Amino acid sequence: MQTTLRVRRFNPEHDQPSSYFQDYDLEVNPADSVLDGLIKVRETIDDSLALRCSCRGAICGSCGMRINGHAALACKTKMISVASEGETIQIEPMKNMPVIKDLITDMASFWSKIRQIQPWLQPQGPPPTTEYTAPPQAMQHLNRVMSCIMCGVCVSDCTVLEVDSQFIGPAALAKAYRFVADPRDAATRQRLENLNTPGGMWDCTRCMECIQACPKGVGPMDRIMSLRTKGMAAKIPATCGSRHAEVFTDIIKHKGILDEPMLAVRTFGLKHVGRLFEMIPMVFQSILKGKVPLSGPLHKPLTSIRHIQRLFKRARKKS
Ligand code: FES
């Protein structure tokens, strides 16, 4: 089939400060991958196109890029799945990391955040004479998270990193979970405390983009939620993040509806009263845009609150 690859080009030697799109028309097999198409471009049309790849089998994690606006592995994305009628395919470098050239990004901050979570086993006691072993059933729940190939695709589509580069990000948090939940590791509390800081596990906004983007089914956001649960179960000192989760639940339990002003007040409390004042412009904007409920800012409990409380009781019994 005939298609067009529209590739975002950037050469730091000539194109400062901005990049541009370049179209390549080519004949491809529908079963080819986007990476096959890009390699064909490089071999037959334009040998100046820069991209990273190695295994071509979704193993090495080096061909992460944005395809039609979403990050993916180019070697795992079939032409037919993104251009069944020969539509133009837009290809860009990953987001949330600087571009070195064309489709190649600088992953230094990605790796430094992975190092920050100390991605190695920290067992207690003297080293065993052979290897550190654990029964297979104790490791089964880690299978998915251990499939991570460190491609950076989840980091590229993370909406928090887009506005806050200090956020540790979904890949590092999923990796942290891998060690926190490893029965052989003895540094669990310390790991959870390290993640209980600004930029850590409480900064994820649960947009689910990382779950959708991950080519290996790691489900980074689910792992972040598990870290939070473990942090609260271990009674790690409360932060605005953990208080937000507790207060949210408490308000729903007592009113059946989210009382947002109360949520903000109880989350920040007197200790972080400055944060409340920072929210005043947002409150006015919400009023202007009609986002404040017609019933007024203070919510009364729903008349059906008893049903909701029954659900809470049932959930507590099950846990
Ligand atoms: S080339 Fe190795 S993951 Fe795509």
Image (cartoon, rainbow, N blue to C red):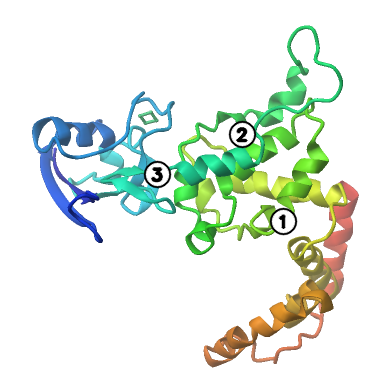
* Residue type highlighted by circle 3: Asp
* Res 145 label: 2
User: Which residue lies at the image location 72% right of the left edge and 45% below the top edge?
Assistant: 226
The answer to which of 184 and 296 lies nearer the viewer is 184
The Cα atoms of the two marked residues, 2 and 3, are separated by 24 Å
The answer to which of 77 and 111 lies nearer the viewer is 111
Q: Position of residue 18 (x, y in %)?
A: 24, 60
Q: Position of residue 270 (x, y in %)?
A: 83, 79
**Dot 3 corresponds to which residue?**
106
Residue 287 vertical position relative to residue 142 in the rendered view, above or below: below
Q: Is residue 14 left or right of 284 when viewed as pictured?
A: left
| Mark 3 Cβ and ligand 1 under 8 Å apart | no
Q: Quadrant of ligand 1?
A: top left
State yes or no: discs 1 and 3 in contact (Cβ < 8 Å): no
The Cα atoms of the two marked residues, 1 and 3, are separated by 26 Å
* Residue type highlighted by circle 2: Val
Q: Residue furthest top?
A: 129
Q: Position of residue 10 (x, y in %)?
A: 23, 51
* Residue type highlighted by circle 1: Thr
User: Which residue lies at the image location 77% right of the left edge and 24% below the top edge?
Assistant: 138
